[in-house]
Amino acid sequence: METKKLTILKAIEKVHATSKDTKLKIDQYEVVKDEIKVVENYFKVNEIQAIILSSFLSLSCIDEIELIEVIKYFNLEKIEFLQYTLDINLLVNKNILLRKEHHRMAAEDYHTNPELLKFIISNNPIPECLIEIPAKEDSFIEFLGDLDKLSKQKDNREIEYHFFLYNLRNLIEDYSKYKLVNFAQENLKLIDSFVFFDVIIDVIAAGENNFRSSLQGTVDDFTNRNRDSYQYISDFLEGKTKLNQLDLVEKNKTQFGDKHKIQLTQKALKMLEELEGIKIGFKENKSEKLLYPDKIQKTKLFYNSSEQVQLNTILKSMSHKSFTNLQKRLSNSNLPIGMTSLLYGAPGTGKTESVYQIAKQFNRPVFKVEISETKSMWFGESQKLIKKVFTDYYEIKDREKICPILLFNEADAIIGKRKAAGSSSVADTENAIQNILLEELEDFNGILFATSNLVDNIDAAFERRFLFKIKFEKPSNENAAKIWKSKIPILSNKQAISLATNFNFSGGEMENISRKCIMEDAVLGSTVSFDQIYYFCENEKWGNNNLTNKIGF
């Protein structure tokens, strides 16, 4: 027989047919020496691998087969077949055989790589790049890959727990020439090392450091008992682990134990870059629901003395450090830890703008709820919607680096005096909203401001819920003159005092006059005169006699 006329498919068939009950004894294959050589050369394998491969290909070319079927075909005992496991692993590593892992070795499923069958059937050579074993890369990234594989083996119960620990120690030892691995080996416990590197894997996979890893899930991937997970998580939350003490991993701000997310600290990110050359940027996912400080225009506000005194108390507690310390002290005294403030008074007196400027000054984002615009949404879904406001706020608060401000703007509709129960469906709905709001304020954890134009109609039940209650009055003549000068810089001091004395305007009304001046200047192309400004002021109020045609509904 001439070997060159033998197709690879025919050679595989003949070797397989000869293999039945041979116990893989080489002297049984004398009659198919040429066929074995064809298989060897085609797949770039040795003699025994060519024999084993021929039977695997023949038995699994259409359906998957279990390893035990091949063992029986050769008429081998399981213990006898163990010596060939490295040969099978090589065939898998060369991507000739595909293996579906199972925690019992004999039950592992194999099938022929379908991408290679077309070459075999057509008797065309397989490109070498498709069946060569890539050289194992000796790198820190390879270490992370091996650790990830080991973790998955434990999760899939492919490896007993004590072997998992043994292999993890050996893996760290084998890669200890890498500086970050060596650091972990010398400074961390085994569980700390696993959590640390598992978080690094998540960070690299995501391409950003943004609380992607679950504390519970990551710890569970290492431990074998619930009580061990509980103990480590408790220690971590109390700052007792090496990861806390060495400032390597930090958690988000959620108060719910099963929802804690963790990420690398800035120190760990710096170590990752300096020791292993891996730079991870921090992508800050800004919430669309928040107004961030950089989007708030800085505005100078002028307060009456009584307002300034009360605001100063709030301002002293608004820095990140002061607010955190305040919450700790309140908690230690078994008091509510939220900071809730009500700013109330006539329209245009600077209540909402004050909240924005506080947010700007202390770099806090604002989660604004516009009650007047959304009131129609409450009916029918009132309880769910008001609760969702707080649920959304807490979720956002957990994601943000600094506690945001929850702003209930124009909250008249939900903090006004309650109506008699049963008087109307609308009244019952508004009362239900207020009851829920009162409950939420009782246990509030964060910073809340509510603004209201109501002066004498605030429900008494809300008095205790708001830690600070500041009434905003129209500006004094002295402050009004300062506001006029800030809004319309062309005014002289005397003119500003004249406007302040003759018109009892709020800051919002002065803002309107300023806008009219700018519009007049833009249309006429000339600076407005004081007489024109005075005329605008006379016509600002609805009740003035020269407003002959009021808009009515």
Image (cartoon, rainbow, N blue to C red):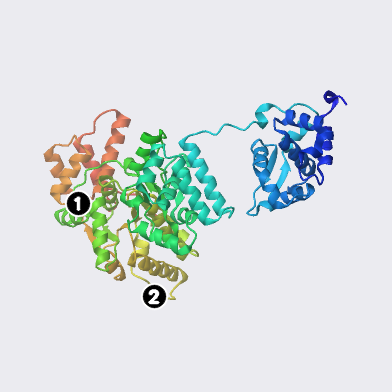
Q: Earlier in the sequence, mark 1 or mark 2?
A: 2
Whether label 1 touches label 2, CB < 8 Å: no
Please state which of residues 60 and 327 is positioned toward the viewer in this rendering.
60
Please state which of residues 321 and 244 is positioned toward the viewer in this rendering.
244
Residue at screen point 20% across, 38% down: 531
On screen, residue 320 above or below 532: below
Give left or right: position of 173 versus 103: left
* Real-space CA distance between mark 1 and mark 2, rounded to the nearest whole angstrom: 37 Å
Please state which of residues 165 and 420 is positioned toward the viewer in this rendering.
165
Residue 536 coordinates in the image, percent (x, y): 25, 42
How dense is the environment of label 1, judged by Cα within 10 Å: few (below 14), some, or many (20 and up)?
A: some
Instruction: Check disc 2 and report its element: helix, strand or loop.
Output: loop
Q: Residue furthest front?
A: 27
Q: Quadrant of residue 84?
A: top right
Q: Residue furthest left?
A: 494
Residue 186 coordinates in the image, percent (x, y): 36, 45
Residue wearing tag 2: 420
Q: In which quadrant will I find the N terminus? A: top right
Q: Residue furthest right?
A: 1
On screen, residue 464 above or below 312: below
How dense is the environment of label 2, judged by Cα within 10 Å: few (below 14), some, or many (20 and up)?
A: few
Instruction: Check disc 1 and report its element: helix, strand or loop.
Output: loop
The amino acid on which the numbered mark 1 sits, given as a three-letter code, is Asn
Residue wearing tag 1: 504
Please state which of residues 495 and 381 is positioned toward the viewer in this rendering.
381
Q: Quadrant of residue 19?
A: top right
Give left or right: position of 101 versus 199: right
Q: Nearer the viewer, mark 1 or mark 2?
A: 2
Residue at screen point 21% across, 41% down: 534
Count of all numbered marks drawn on residues in the image: 2
Is residue 553 visible to the viewer in this orientation of the structure? no
On screen, residue 84 above or below 431: above
